[in-house]
Image: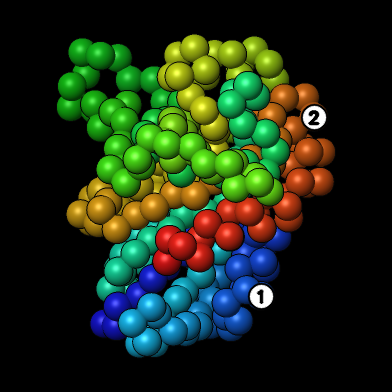
Amino acid sequence: MKLTKAIITALPEEADLIVEKYKLKQEITKWFMTIYTGERQSDDGEKETIILCLCGVGKIYATMAMTYLCENYQLEKVVNIWVVGNLLWDAMQVGDVIIPNTFLQHDVYIPDFLDELSYLRDPIFLEYAIWENYDLKKFSLRLSGICVTGDQFIDDPETIEKLAQDYGADIVDMEAYAILSVAKNYDILDKCVTIKSVSDGADSEAAKDHKDNLSFAMENAIAILDFTL
């Protein structure tokens, strides 16, 4: 199989911006999932294959899509990119980009004495973050942080406070932990990067802010994607 760089995103609005930027063409529609493909010239002058997987929202869809990619492509790199809710407004604002290095599930409860199920509560670490923040004028880039994943759209202050206190979380999403769990089982965690851009504050205005700010937030994330692929 040809070496492939894969991008995974959840929403059509997110995917459309990536398709346009890299001039990708729709190739496969399978189940809920759509895959777009294209080529670009790498830094060494060689052509490289890029695929975009529009996987759908939530851990189940993300798990199925990542498994499909691992089974059908020789993955050189996997970049999980999309917008997220911000839990720490003193640290980040709408449009800021974070590349987290620690991932947990917040909607799973497994008692400590059930050691055989510890994999469901254990964090996943990616070792690429360098623990620095950068002011890029248009937005800030944060290279580290904790992302918590659950099949819930977070939009209330009580839950925000709980996630921040229980997990020290910076952001919340609905897919990252699932994607990385599959990558871990296929032994390709070292090929994975997660880029998240803040679209909302996970508060009572989250649904409206998410829609209003999605394009702006994704454009900033895609600017970082260029350096990551």
Q: Amino acid at mark 2?
A: Glu
- In the image, residue 168 above or below residue 154: above
Task: Kindly report which numbered mark, 2 or 1, lies closer to the viewer in this rendering.
Answer: 1
Secondary structure of the residue carrying tag 2 is loop
Give whichever of discs 2 and 1 has the lower sequence position.
1
> Is 157 displayed left or right of 109 in the figure?
right
Q: Which residue is mark 1?
A: 20
Mark yes or no: residue 147 visible. yes
Q: Residue at x 45, y 19 (%)?
A: 168
Q: Residue at x 34, y 54 (%)?
A: 192
> Is 160 displayed left or right of 71 in the figure?
right
- In the image, residue 16 above or below residue 163: below
Q: Nearer the viewer, residue 48 or 117?
A: 48
- In the image, residue 198 above or below residue 217: above
Residue 152 falls in image quadrant: top right
Q: Which residue is mark 2?
A: 205
Q: Position of residue 129 (x, y in %)?
A: 35, 42
Q: Residue at x 21, y 19 (%)?
A: 114
Q: Position of residue 179 (x, y in %)?
A: 40, 50
Screen quadrant of the N terminus:
bottom left
Q: Nearer the viewer, residue 88 or 59?
A: 88
Disc sitting over residue 202 in the figure: none
Residue 13 falls in image quadrant: bottom right
Residue 126 falls in image quadrant: top left
Q: Position of residue 104 (x, y in %)?
A: 39, 31
Circle 2: is it few (<14), some (14-19), or many (20+) Cα within 10 Å? Answer: few
Q: Residue at x 73, y 52 (%)?
A: 216
